Amino acid sequence: DEIASTPLHDLSWWQQSPAERDAAFASLRRDRPRMFVPLGPAKEGSRPKGFWALTTYEDILEVSRRPEDFSSGIGGTQIFDQPAELQEYRGSIIDMDNPEHARLRKIVSRGFTARNLSGLRDEIEETVSEILDEMSETGECDFVEEFASLLPLRIIDNLLGIPREHEKFILEATNTILGASDSEYIEDQSARGIGKAVTAASEALIALLNDLAEDRIANPQDDLITKLVAADDENLTPQEMAKFFILLVGAGNETTRNVISHGLHVLTQHPEQRDLWLSDYEEYATTAIEEMLRWATPVIHFRRTVTRDGVMLGDLELFEGDKVVMWYTSANRDETIFDDPEKFDITRDPNPHVAFGGAGAHFCLGAHLARLELDVAFRMLFERYPDIRAVGEPVRLRSNFLNGIKHLRAEYTVAP
Ligand code: HEM
């Protein structure tokens, strides 16, 4: 039947409109909330290849809370196991289980505690102000290129201590790695072409990191690279550092920007919501930002792998090596949790969305930083250009992993 063959791993399936995808997920939640998606024919006597597509909020939250049954380390957190040639570059905390996960997460969290980030608001304000100054004075621009992508990029660069001269390179490298399935970023879309380009981008990132790390050992600075390479007994090995660096520049860059872009687009589509927010920015900021996070759900899914035979998820019995995929996109529209889930409502409260992952060990390390960036971004954007609006349809990233927007035209009145 049609539902049973919903090919969630298939990139072309993700080319349909968001409304069509939402409708398909609603059917899955209703009729096949734990659907098995086969990947190739089953061999006799062995478990069929494929993954269980989890689409309800409840299942996704539960899986995220049981890392001992649902591993991030076995084969990684993407639908397909990590290719051997990329193992050197991938596999930081996001693809780890305890005890390694807890040990490393504790070390890398040093730079991410609320206290450590408190001085950051001023820095983000300065950065937004600078970006607004640089924005086109013609009153129109590619909002992704001139605003949305620049803020997270400059903030993660500052945090790590990457000099401004490398900004363009960092953006291109993370676009290549996380936008690998889009021909705008990698022209040769054969498996070999993608592998080559992603390897090259990862190696170039590591080369830059090695230069910076060497420098920081000799000349410590007030930045995360210095903190992580600092000579004490909780040091990261160079290999751990390299993987974490790639994870961090990617996660820093390729997520928050999409909430900014989807945010401007959806606020343009719903002028009454936008007017309400602008009538009292402070009053609605917290709930509006959570609603934009729910709406955009920049990370579409992550995968887990079952660690032993006999793991139960509700009444579904699972076996060692079975893959389960948590479709956050679907959980964030689950009608049992969110009233009128297809409605964009900046006053929605409570709003327990899973845009940052469910709960538990792997909950997004950058959530606080992302929320801070979103708050400052919209506050200052609307102060400078109160009438800014998206024009036309966004150009979406070809991906089943990131709900990305590559380009979005915007118009605004520039004061004479
Ligand atoms: C983990 C989403 C921003 C760093 C995650 C996970 C999600 C997510 C869904 C869970 C992974 C899992 O369960 O396997 C997002 C979204 C963001 C965002 C939607 C923006 C709106 C950031 C930023 C940073 C960051 C700005 C860093 C500067 C990380 C790291 C992890 C993570 C390091 C791995 C945590 C672990 O495995 O222990 N993120 N993220 N994220 N995120 Fe984010």
Image: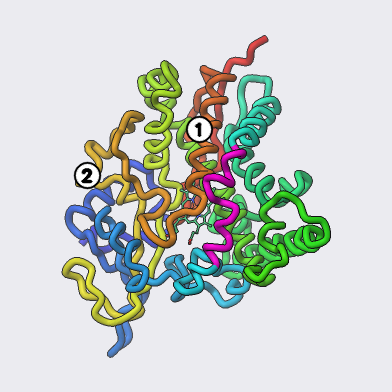
N-terminal-most mark, 1 or 2: 2
Left or right: 215 as drawn, with respect to 40: right
**Hey, what amino acid is under mark 2?**
Glu
Quarter of the image with the C terminus in it: top right
Q: Is residue 113 magenta?
A: yes
Disc ID at residue 375: 1
Considering the numbered disc 1 on the image, is that residue within a helix, a strand or a loop?
helix
Q: Of residues 165 and 121, which is closer to you in this image?
A: 121
Question: Closer to the camera, 193 or 84?
Answer: 84
Question: Please, what is the three-letter code of the amino acid marked with disc 1?
Answer: Asp
- Tell me if residue 237 is in the magenta stretch: no
The local secondary structure at tag 2 comes to loop
Q: Main secondary structure of the magenta part?
A: helix
The residue at which mark 2 appears reads as 335
Instruction: Residue 49 in the image: state x and y as whole percent.
Output: 35, 77
Label at residue 193? none
Q: Quick one: which residue is furthest to the top in this view?
A: 416
Q: Quadrant of residue 291?
A: top left
Q: Is residue 255 above or below residue 282?
A: below
Q: Quadrant of residue 90?
A: bottom right
**Residue 72: image location, x then y, percent:** 43, 69
From the viewer's side, name the closer residue of 128 and 329: 128
Q: Which residues are magenta?
A: 104-120
Tell me which colouring the rendered structure shows. Answer: rainbow
Q: Residue at x 52, y 50 (%)?
A: 366
Q: Residue at x 52, y 38 (%)?
A: 372
Disc 1 under 8 Å from ligand 1? The reply is no
Give the quarter of the figure containing the N terminus.
bottom left
Which residue is depicted at the point 22% across and 38% down? 339
Note whether residue 162 is visible: yes
Residue 50 visible in rendering: no
